[in-house]
Structure formats: C-alpha cells, structure tokens
Image (cartoon, rainbow, N blue to C red):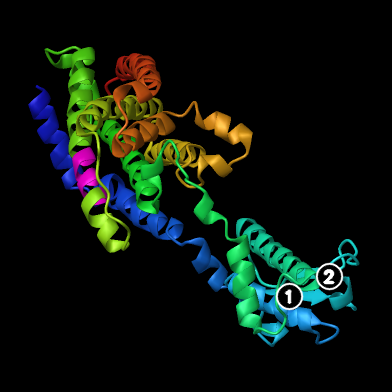
Amino acid sequence: MILASLKKEALIILSDVHSIGVLLILPVAFMLIMTFAMSEQQNDIVAKTSLYLNSAENNDFSLVYQGYLAEQGFQIVDDKAQADIAIDLPTGFDERILTGLKAQSISLDILSKISPQRSGLLVELVQVALAKLRLHAYMLDSGELEDDISLEQQIEIIGDSTNVADYFLITTPEHKLASATLYSVPSWIIFGIYFIVLPVSITVINEKQNGTLIRLKTFPISSAKYFISKVSAFCLLSALQFIILTLIGIYAVPVITEQPEIVISNWPMYAFSALFIIVSANALAFLVAALVNSYEQAIVLGGGINILLAAVSGFMVPIDIMPQIMADIASFSPLYWSAEIIRAAFSGKDLGAVMSYIINLSIFSLVTMALAKYLFEMKIRKLTWN
C-alpha cells in the first residue's frame, strides 16, 4: 500500500514542474543567493565606500586623518558628488585635536543609500580612524613619535601600536560554522524540506476535486490507514529530497559560490536527526492540507507559514542581530529547532547537545500529526456525492 502510494505521489510530483521547483529548485536558489549575500567580508564592504574629507584649513592633521581613513579601507575621493560619506572638519582642527574639540564639531554625512547595518560599521571605522589620529598627535607631542620620518612610516608605527588582534585567541562554541556556506546550507535545506507543505496540500485538493477522497468510502480501507500510507509516502519523498539537497549543499554550493568546502562531521547524528525533521515537516504539511480547500488557500497559508517561520528562525537575518523579542519567538519555531540540529551535526557536536530540540520536534510532530489526522478524517466524512 505504501509503495503504491509512494509511486503515485512520485509520478504526480515529477509530472508537475511547480512541485519540483518548490522541493528542489527554490531551496537550492536560496542556498546560492544567501551564501553569496553573506560571503562578503568587512574589508570588501568598506572598500566599496567612497569618502570625501573637507577641511576648512588644509592643515597637516587633516592629511594624516585622510591617511588613517584610507588605512581603514575607504576610497578617498576629491569630489563630494562622488562620495558615499562626507566628513567636514571644524576650524582650528590641528590645534584642537587633543583637548579642544567640542562635542559634535565634526560633521559626518551619509550621502548615498546605505543600510543601517553597513552605516553603523562605517561610522565606527571613521571614529576608529580619529582615535588613531589623536594617538598620533599625542605621541608627536610627547616625543614618542619622530616627526622627521615620512607620514607613511608614522601611520605604520601607530597601526602597529594599536593592532591588538595578535593578543587574542578566539574560540566560540561553533567555531566551525564561521563561513557563510556553513550558515546558509543547513538553513535552506530545512527551508526546502518544510516546503513539502505545498505538494501535499495540492495533492489533497486534487484528490478532493477528482473524487478520490469521496470514493474512499467505498474502498475496503479506512481513512486512517489511507492517511498513514499517504504520510509514509511523502516522508519517503522528503527523505529523497533531504539527500539531494544535502549533496548539493555540500558539494555544489561551495564550488559555485567559491566558498570553503564543508563537511558533515557527525554523519550518524545527521541521519538520525533527519528522521525527526522529515516527520515534523510532513506533520505540518498535512495539517495545512487538512485545513485548506483551494489552491489559493494552499499557496497563501502553506507558503506563507513556511516563509514566515524561515524569517523568524534566523534563516534570512541571523538571530544574534535580531531584537530580543524576535529571538525569543525563534526558539518556538520547528524550523529553528531543525536547523540547529543539523548545524550541530555539521560542527561535530554529539546528540546530547541537541536533545532538547529533538524532544521539541517530537512533541510538535505528535500533536500536529494527531490534529492533521483528525481534520483529514473529518474532511472525508463531510464529503457527499454530487
């Protein structure tokens, strides 16, 4: 029964280009797009930013400040019309650099359309350059910095003095998840798996419209057994989808996006946790399928729920830069639990590290599947012959 149902569902999905797009093409496209989007480093972001420095007096320290801004990575331009950022220094900047600068005396204007996140980074780097300039002025004033060497050498000495990166040994709980690929691939594998909601909903709607569901009343099989066989068939299809997306994510995405290659460090846990993820995704899919009665409802409710859950689960914006209330909401999302489980498998953690997520998924699957089964049987009972 299950194999026959699997063959039927597979033939339906393979004959429908929209289902193939939802299950494979869409998540792979998101993997590539988000990996590209997140792969740019800070140096690349700053290097794309042009800066115009305006001084009321063409003095020495304005030139030195320009040197430190260039050291931070900014492109210094001579025409304000070509600049993304413009800085206006106050009168008497040289004399006031150490003790005489007034609050808000330096004007910084962001001239082009820059995101709040990027502008925050750029403003911070402009301020770091000023901090280096003030150290430069202090060391010149105290005689610790020789004024007879070239400006480039002076800037290099200050740069060496303020470079503290070598003093830190940085370790994080997820040190292996440092690359954009290792963040994006698990997220969009899960996104693709949960998008099984649309093929499931469309199949149920088709069976209702072509009379398959109502003919179940004449078959020597209960609606409960039919529901279980249908769930089993789609779970097997999801398992195949999971394997394909995993292989694409591991072997194809790093090559296409020119990112470091990635590996799954704990394959047994990855395979074991995939079972819970697949069942959870199909439980949600069949609940939605039992609720909707038209293709429009399936697209809006099914697709909408999946996209919204992906958004609050940190797939599009990392959770650690979300407002706290959104981060709290994410902790109740099955997509978040699922993504955290396979990220742990990628990074080599053991099962104990994600057991709470597996328990959450198990409870979610049991409750959702039981409700889906009840609503599915109710839908069949309400059907009448035309």
Does the stretch in magenta take in 244?
A: yes
Marker count (numbered): 2
Task: Locate residue 56, reporting x and y percent.
Answer: 85, 83
Q: Residue at x 24, y 31 (%)?
A: 207
Left or right placement of residue 314 versus residue 80 in this view: left
Tell whether 133 sits left or right of 346: right
Q: For this rendering, which residue is in front, 46 or 61?
A: 61
Q: Is residue 318 magenta?
A: no
User: Circle 1: is it few (<14), some (14-19), or many (20+) Cα within 10 Å?
Assistant: many
Residue 234, x across and y down, in percent: 21, 31
245 in relation to 69, above or below: above
Please name whichever residue, 171 or 138, is drawn nearer the observer in this view of the structure.
138
Which residue position is annotated with label 2?
A: 97
Q: Is residue 232 left or right of residue 186?
A: left
Mark 1 residue type:
Ala
Q: Quadrant of the C terminus?
A: top left
Nearest to the observer: residue 138 or residue 319: 138
Single out the mark in the foreground, 2 or 1. Answer: 2
Numbered circle sitting on residue 136: none
Q: Is residue 256 above or below residue 193?
A: below
The answer to whether residue 160 is visible is yes
Please name the amino acid that badge 2 sits on: Ile
Camera-side residue of 322 and 197: 322
Q: Give the residues drawn in magenta, as a range.
A: 241-249
Q: Is residue 338 above or below residue 25?
A: above
**Which residue is denoted by mark 1 in the rendering?**
86
Q: Position of residue 182 (x, y in %)?
A: 35, 47
Quarter holding the N terminus is top left
